[in-house]
Image (cartoon, coloured by chain):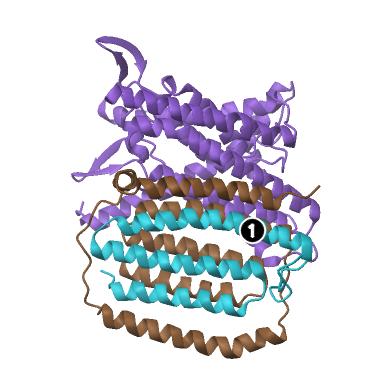
Chain colours: A purple, B brown, C cyan
Amino acid sequence: MATLSDTELFLLVTMIKIAVVMFVLMTTVAYLSWLERKVVAHIQSRWGPYLVGPHGLLQPLADGVKFLFKEDIVPLEVDRVVYWLAPFLSFALAFLSIAVIPFGGTFTIQGRTFNFQITDVNVGLLFIFAVTSLGVYSIVLAGWSANSKYSFFGGLRSSAQMISYETAMGLAVVGTLMIAGTLSLRGIVDGQSGTWVIGTFNTYLPRWNIFVQPVGFFVYLTAAVAETNRIPFDLPEGEAEYSNMVTVSCLATLLFFGGWHGPLFGPGWLRMLLPIFWFCLKVFCFLFFYIWMRGTLPRFRYDQLMSFGWKFLLPLGLLNVLATSFVVAWLSA
Amino acid sequence: MEILFYICAAVSVLAALNVVLQRTPVYSALSLILVLCLLAVIYLLLGAEFIAVIQVIVYAGAIMVLFVFVIMLLNAGREVPSERSRLARWLGVPLVIAFLLEVLWAVWNQFPSGTAPAADFDAGPAAIGHLLFRNYVLPFEVTSVLILVAILGAVVLAKKEE
Amino acid sequence: MIPLSHVLTLSVILFVIGAAGFVLRRNIITVFMCIELMLNAANLAFIAFSRYLGTLDGQLFVFFVIVVAAAEAAVGLAIIIALYRNRETLNIEDLDSMKL
């Protein structure tokens, strides 16, 4: 095999990483809709999709084909440019944030070390927040461009909800940041390897942030559900945004559940691939949790939703930041 | 690296022109958001990664959302040119171009294109935090009071009179 | 490396476009957006100088400008909403008296 130069190798590996991540993400998003229909159906004592393929496994494909042949209805008097721009924007942003998510340790090719991550940014967490903060536009523009006052109200409500819960979400992760001392997602995960040791006593609990930041985790999880417009906070549109769901689940795994850390065993290749398995398993648990919640909880009313976000989650997040900073300062003093 | 800067610069100038030339405020706002994001990319190229991200989060993601909200809330449509705005065009544009040439002349004289950048330095969040809470504590606290006043002012101003 | 003068040129061009919009536009919201454009042009100059002088202070200034711009936008837009409620217009030529 001819050896590649460093730049060529870097480009090749990056391209492969992007292709694999895109493929996995697209498939996950497609099959999340299947999973959601199946799980909700079983919760409600129904069968769910059953006709296309075994257990309806080919249903996402059938849906895709159906969407391709569907007539594109453009209502009268809509703002064409914005009408097309809004959904495009929401997809582009959803894919953009996945680029900085690390999903495993490192691997070595020809003596060069690569991360299991498309790109490692040292402000990775802020990058994700930046991308999600732009996601508001896709909703508000979609609502406005349809030139109907009802969709406009829906868009306004939805974006007000997203902005309100974004602040709580930002505050919720500050605690983990203070513990990790870095904004790099890889650095945050690296700080969660091993087990908690109190003095000389090994607790055999994994060193995940969830055990020291339960309040932060609660605020993050609740705000993330609202941010992605899922039940019980889904009143603005009642539709699911699967790829954003994947992003917030990945982030929850990275920040609070130790990312790809888990028990390692077996031969070398297994040790390399197991972290990715642990990461995917944790993300899957979060995704299942989302769907489970949809099958269980009723919907909030809009004013309840706003007062919950501003009067409960936000103060709770602030208190968490305050308490964490005192403890961190006390421990480091 | 350099080529990316020139692409971003060219597109941001076009988008900025679009901000000014569009008669529909929503399009102006969208172009301005594009300018802000491109500026964030340029900040990244200039090694200011923290400010670049803050620019997107605060400027593009929060301040411009306010603008878009208000434009949609007030249903601001196309603006109609009036007599005086024509006067502004015939008088204003030459003046503005003269101003542009003057400042450009000053810049090119003062900083010939050979000016080399300083060596790479740490512009990460930690370095900015240290500077912010050591050398700039007073401005920081004053701005936080300013923000508080602004919040109160906005609530009082926008509240409906009963 | 990008020459300092090129970055400053971009900054000047953006500033002048903002100034031109400030003079030409009649919609008060667009005028306000042109002010934001001018602020950003100044920010770009700050970042460029910070890079070429090798100090972080320029970036700190940008930080403060962004914060102040947020406060300014909140108050300014609230004023615009209050104005619109009283006058039902966004055209700055119709907003020419001090009294309501």
Q: Nearer the viewer, residue A179 or B89?
A: B89
The outermost residue toward the top is A201
**Residue found at the far front of this picture:** C99
Q: Position of residue A296 (x, y in %)?
A: 69, 23
Q: Chain of mark 1?
A: C
Q: Is residue C91 visible?
A: yes
Query: Is A255 situated above or below B69?
Result: above
**Crowdedness near tag 1: few (<14), some (14–19) or many (≥20) residues, C-alpha within 10 Å:** many
- Left or right: B143, with A227 as reference point: left
Identified at 60% across, 44% down, the residue is A163
| Residue located 22% across and 73% down the image | B115
Find residue C74 and report its horizontal and vertical position in percent: 59, 54
The quadrant holding residue A6 is: bottom left
Q: How many labels sit on residues?
A: 1
User: As rendered, which of B54 and A138 lies closer to the eye?
Assistant: B54
Specify whether residue A95 is in view.
no
Residue A22 position (above or below residue A199): below
